[in-house]
Image (cartoon, rainbow, N blue to C red):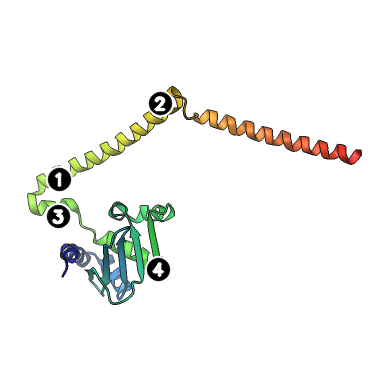
Amino acid sequence: MDALEAILRPVAELLNRNIQESTPAKELCKDLSGTIVAVRVRNTALTAYFLIGDETLDVATSSSKEPDVIVCGSLITLARINAKSSEAAIRDGSLDLLGDARLADHFQKLLNHAKPDVEEELSSLIGDVAAHRLSEISRGVGRWGRDARSTMSANIREYLQEESRDVPSRYETDKFNENVSTLRDDVDRLEARVNRLQENL
């Protein structure tokens, strides 16, 4: 067993424990039984193979059989991926998907049912109160990060549009597009007049 497989083994055990506690997850396992899903980290040699059985899954770093589905993306994209974000990630190219789309969709649903509740897992290690407080802090930091990014983006946009005038405002862009449309229509009308004059001559 290599180092990566040693790291993945506890993950598989945790997923399997949650699969056993979820009827939809067990049904998805049966539907996917025999399926191999390869998850590759882009621009690295890291690949995890999910070998799905009747009611469990195994994780390995190699497979003698070709995978039915290959999912490839950056480590950050793969870590953040969920049912809602996967379609957007595929559209913008940050996630590549090869193979049977139906199997990939069912695998995504299986992981959603099997993924651990972080707060619950922490509570078994550090206690309920501390785990709840740590989760609240984590959510608060996440919200702060999103708000800070949104505020910074708005401030930069306002500076570029209003202060430095390096970027046109939305109104200026719309007005420019309107003027271009008017000019195009005028040129079309002028061309039609010229053509009529040439025909008359």
> The residue under label 1 is which amino acid type?
His
In this view, the residue farthest toward the top is 163
Residue in the picture at 17% in, 67% down: 2
Distance of label 2 from label 3 (alpha carbons): 45 Å
Above or below for 138 versus 166? below
Q: Nearer the viewer, mark 2 or mark 4?
A: 2
Q: Which mark is residue 132?
A: 1
- Residue nearest the observer in this picture, 149 or 117: 149
Question: In the figure, is residue 34 to the left or right of 128?
Answer: right
Splitting the image into 4 quarters, where does residue 52 fall? bottom left
Q: Which mark is residue 80?
A: none
Above or below for 158 versus 146? above
Q: Which mark is residue 99?
A: 4
Q: Earlier in the sequence, mark 1 or mark 3?
A: 3
Q: Secondary structure at mark 2?
A: helix
Q: Which residue is mark 2?
A: 159
The percent coordinates of residue 57 (x first, y second) are: 23, 70
Question: In the figure, is residue 142 to the left or right of 1?
Answer: right
Distance of label 2 from label 1 (alpha carbons): 40 Å
Q: Earlier in the sequence, mark 2 or mark 3?
A: 3
- Residue nearest the observer in this picture, 91 or 138: 91
Q: Are marks 4 and 3 in contact (CB under 8 Å)?
A: no
Residue in the picture at 59% in, 34% down: 177
Q: Which residue is mark 3?
A: 121
- Residue nearest the observer in this picture, 10 or 22: 10
Quarter occupied by the N terminus: bottom left
